[in-house]
């Protein structure tokens, strides 16, 4: 990708802040747009004040703010959303507003400002109740949560705007991304940071269900690499959606075992901490594993970090910031 001005929505979030890092390192100008609903400004504190980087506090639910932020941009990376399946089940309207109405605002703002290339975050949740493994693009089931419905609808709108208005939309279906800066706190925290935080506090991590659920855990550097591939991709990738994962799966108890051994190198007492079980969560799928061959073929996606290589980098960060 040649250097240019890129708007990153959700740019102070977990994945977004890493995307901003990579774009700034690549010599791009970055406009980071976020309403700080689920993120902290400290995620991007190291970028603020650097030439080429600008933070804009704004809401994707307000189209005029989006249009202003988009002016002069050559591409958009759209990551702003309210994540979490349980959050969307507990209170669907805010998820619907940010993830669906906010997405349509983004498409309209792009149509009116002339920005063509948009790389946006979809989710593995679009596979819903499909039992097929590995998950392949084109074998989606019915969504199991309001969050998944919003991501399915985003993909449908993206397809429409690509064919109707020529926008070059590239959808990335992220599978369980983990890494530094992912928030371990709050009721909607993701599994890996929540487990790490519990171990660091010398508490038993709480596993919903029997812990045999499997996931294709994806280190954040792989997700960032996919975003950069999407920005640089040839036009034939536009209008398409891609699985973004490592392409391997681990069950939750297995992940906890890996975390325990990584963390025990830092704090030997953690080696003796067991797990607690809680009831299954509605809306969760049992197994998830991605076929990433489409992204490899059309985007040149080549994930470098498997689970352990990702944990080698993420665990020390949590030990430094959350102990
Ligand atoms: N982390 C994962 O495992 C995962 C998996 C699948 C899909 N995704 C998708 O990837 C994207 C990034 O996720 P993340 O894990 O970095 O989550 P995150 O919560 O850290 O980042 C989302 C960002 O969007 C911002 N935001 C929310 N509503 C907004 C609004 N109305 N206006 C402007 N900004 C708003 C939040 O403040 C936050 O900074 C999301 O679209 C998410 O649905 C993430």
Image (cartoon, helix red, strand yellow):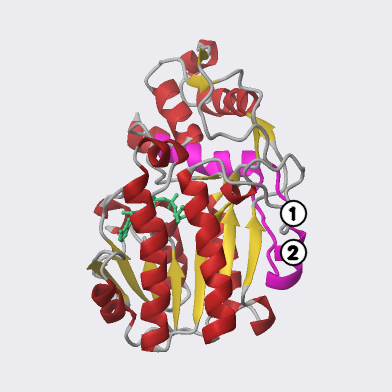
Tag shown at residue 136? 1
Q: Nearer the viewer, residue 63 or 210?
A: 63
Q: Position of residue 58 (x, y in %)?
A: 24, 66
Q: Is mark 1 within 8 Å of ligand 1?
A: no
Tag shown at residue 43? none
Element type at mark 2: helix
Q: Position of residue 100 (x, y in %)?
A: 42, 60
Determine contact: label 1, label 2, CB under 8 Å. yes
Q: How many marks?
A: 2
Mark 1 or mark 2: whose residue is earlier in sequence: 1
Q: Find disc 2 in the rendering and name its residue.
A: 294
Figure check: 163 above or below 305: below
Element type at mark 1: loop
Q: Position of residue 280 (x, y in %)?
A: 54, 22
How packed mark 2 is, by other alpha carbons closer than 10 Å (few <14, some 14-19, many 20 or more), is some
Figure check: 319 above or below 152: above
Q: Position of residue 82 (x, y in %)?
A: 38, 50
Viewed as shown, does residue 168 lie left or right of 147?
Answer: right
- What predominant SS class does the magenta segment belong to? helix
Residue 25 lies in quadrant: bottom left
Figure check: 320 above or below 175: above
Viewed as shown, does residue 155 lie left or right of 61?
Answer: right
Single out the mark in the foreground, 1 or 2: 1
Q: Which residues are magenta?
A: 289-318
Which residue is at 70% across, 64% downward?
295
How far apart, in angstroms, are the residues tagged by discs 1 and 2?
Answer: 9 Å
């Amino acid at each position: 990708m040649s250097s240019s001005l890129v708007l990153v929505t959700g740019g102070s979030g977990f994945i977004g802040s890493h995307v901003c890092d990579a774009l700034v390192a690549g010599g791009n100008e970055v406009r980071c747009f976020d309403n700080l609903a689920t993120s902290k400004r400290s995620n991007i504190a190291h970028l603020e004040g650097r030439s080429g980087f600008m933070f804009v506090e704004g809401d994707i639910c307000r189209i005029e703010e989006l249009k202003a932020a988009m002016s002069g941009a050559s591409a958009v990376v759209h990551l702003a959303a309210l994540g979490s399946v349980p959050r969307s089940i507990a209170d669907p309207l805010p998820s619907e507003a940010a993830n669906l109405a906010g997405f349509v605002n983004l498409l309209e703002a792009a149509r009116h400002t002339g920005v063509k290339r948009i790389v946006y975050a979809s989710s593995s949740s679009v596979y819903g109740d499909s039992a097929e493994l590995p998950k392949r693009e084109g074998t989606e089931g019915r969504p199991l949560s309001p969050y998944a419905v919003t991501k399915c609808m985003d993909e449908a709108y993206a397809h429409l705007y690509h064919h109707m208005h020529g926008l070059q939309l590239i959808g990335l279906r992220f599978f369980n991304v983990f890494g530094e800066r992912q928030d371990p706190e709050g009721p909607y925290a993701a599994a890996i940071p929540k487990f790490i935080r519990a171990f660091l506090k010398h508490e038993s991590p709480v596993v919903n269900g029997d812990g045999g659920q499997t996931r294709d855990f994806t280190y954040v550097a792989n997700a960032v690499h996919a975003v950069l591939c999407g920005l640089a991709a040839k036009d034939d990738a536009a209008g398409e959606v891609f699985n973004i994962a490592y392409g391997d799966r681990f069950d939750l108890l297995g992940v906890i075992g890996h975390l325990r051994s990584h963390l025990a190198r830092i704090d030997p007492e953690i080696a003796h901490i067991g797990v607690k079980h809680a009831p299954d969560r509605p809306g969760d799928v049992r197994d998830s594993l991605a076929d990433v061959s489409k992204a490899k073929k059309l985007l040149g996606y080549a994930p470098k970090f498997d689970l352990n290589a990702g944990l080698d980098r993420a665990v020390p960060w949590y030990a430094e910031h959350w102990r």
